[in-house]
Image (cartoon, grey):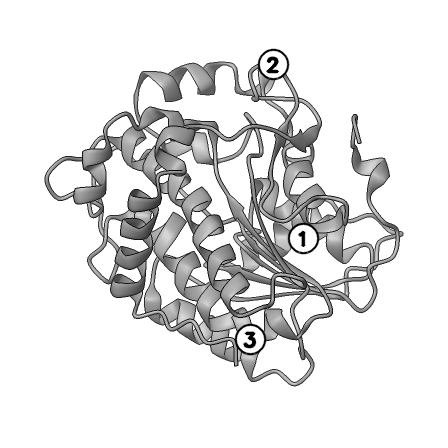
């Protein structure tokens, strides 16, 4: 379907449960709002609970019932925090299943190399490792839904990676280039999708669990406020002129989650010529050379499993 917009969103999501990481600003707030206002149960994971509620309140109207929204503490870069977040969901009898897991939280092009509480480069810890572990911990409840979906968020910035040797330095200890490491984390989102699909297929659950990657386009979010370099400076200077709004940028993930015609393994992004803006549709992947390399994909997956001690048990 061309020109897929907010008007194509279903009106009734009662009985559905969605888990979203990072809803205190930008696209994540819109995702939570659009799902909750349609009656879904939305469980958000955020470092700042108060900020998440205030962000959602800015969208809420007098006609909106957002009682299905709740948020739990989550620092996605901390493996301990991820485990605590997942444990609360898994132990909640009111959440028998998860219809959608949206891996949205992220950071971009930090000026200097920083490390997480666990000693991992912070962009990889936040964008990749935390989501890898979280999915493994929630996969049983994802499996329990009649049909479910996992959405990983990638970016056209994956094109900043031009040398496969970076897969031998996934913790960026030998070299730290802000945009290259960010691009690597976005390639990892595609590699995650494809490797998870293989596991799901082996478990004979591919008839009921989809994994889709999305690109929100060039969207005006706080990500650009702390990023580094010439590219960031350009983006910040045109942020309010050429970039899409968070409501527009959220459509790729909303379509991935709610449009049942989207095939498993798809890549959803803006339909504009640059891929930076437009309505969401199935498009070609960015940096297919590295993202689709099976050796690099296995290397990334094994690194994530080892770093997080993830166990993939479908029960």
Apparent side of residue 184 relative to residue 315 in the rendered image (left or right): left
Q: Which labelled disc corresponds to residue 32?
A: 1
Asked whether disc 2 touches disc 1, contact meaning CB atoms under 8 Å apart, the reply is: no
The tag earlier along the polypeptide, 1 or 3, is: 1
Element on which disc 1 rests: helix
Q: Where is residue 85 in the image (x, y as percent from the top left)?
A: 48, 71
Q: Give the labeled residue for mark 2.
A: 273
The tag earlier along the polypeptide, 3 or 2, is: 3
Element on which disc 3 rests: helix
Q: Residue placed at 71% from the left, 44% from the top?
A: 262
Q: Where is residue 184 in the image (x, y as percent from the top left)?
A: 33, 37
Q: Which of marks 1 and 3 is in front?
A: 3
The tag earlier along the polypeptide, 2 or 1, is: 1
151 or 84: nearer the eye?
151
Mark 2 and mark 1: Cα distance apart in space: 29 Å
Q: Quadrant of the N terminus?
A: top right
Apparent side of residue 201 relative to residue 311 in the rendered image (left or right): right
Residue 159 seen in this snapshot: yes
Q: Which labelled disc corresponds to residue 233?
A: none
In the image, is residue 60 above or below residue 14?
Answer: above
Q: Give the labeled residue for mark 3.
A: 140
315 or 58: nearer the eye?
315
Element on which disc 2 rests: loop
Asked whether disc 1 touches disc 3, contact meaning CB atoms under 8 Å apart, the reply is: no
């Amino acid at each position: 379907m061309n020109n897929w917009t907010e008007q194509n969103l279903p009106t009734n999501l009662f009985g559905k449960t969605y888990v979203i990481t990072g809803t205190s600003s930008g696209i994540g707030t819109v995702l939570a709002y659009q799902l909750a206002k349609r009656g879904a149960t939305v469980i958000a994971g955020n470092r700042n609970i108060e900020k998440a509620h205030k962000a959602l309140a800015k969208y809420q109207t007098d006609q909106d019932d957002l009682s299905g929204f709740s948020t739990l503490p989550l620092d996605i870069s901390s493996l301990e925090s991820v485990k605590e977040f997942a444990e609360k969901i898994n132990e909640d009898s009111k959440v028998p299943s998860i219809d959608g897991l949206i891996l949205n939280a992220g950071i971009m092009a930090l000026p200097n190399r920083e490390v997480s509480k666990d000693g991992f480069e912070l962009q990889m810890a936040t964008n990749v490792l935390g989501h890898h572990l979280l999915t493994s911990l929630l996969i049983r409840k994802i499996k329990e839904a009649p049909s479910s979906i996992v959405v990983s968020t990638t970016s056209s910035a994956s094109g900043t990676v031009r040398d496969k040797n970076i897969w031998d330095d996934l913790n960026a200890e030998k070299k730290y280039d802000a945009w290259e490491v960010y691009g690597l984390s976005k390639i990892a989102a595609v590699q995650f999708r494809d490797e998870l699909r293989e596991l799901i297929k082996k478990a004979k659950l591919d008839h009921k669990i989809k994994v889709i990657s999305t690109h929100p386009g060039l969207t005006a979010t706080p990500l650009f406020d702390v990023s580094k370099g010439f590219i960031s400076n350009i983006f910040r200077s045109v942020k309010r002129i050429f970039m899409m709004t968070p409501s527009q940028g959220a459509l790729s993930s909303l379509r991935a989650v709610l449009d049942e015609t989207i095939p498993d393994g798809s890549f959803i992004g803006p339909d504009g010529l640059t891929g930076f803006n437009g309505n969401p549709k199935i498009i070609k992947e960015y940096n297919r050379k590295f993202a689709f390399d099976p050796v690099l994909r296995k290397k990334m997956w094994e690194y994530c499993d080892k770093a997080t001690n993830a166990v993939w048990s479908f029960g």
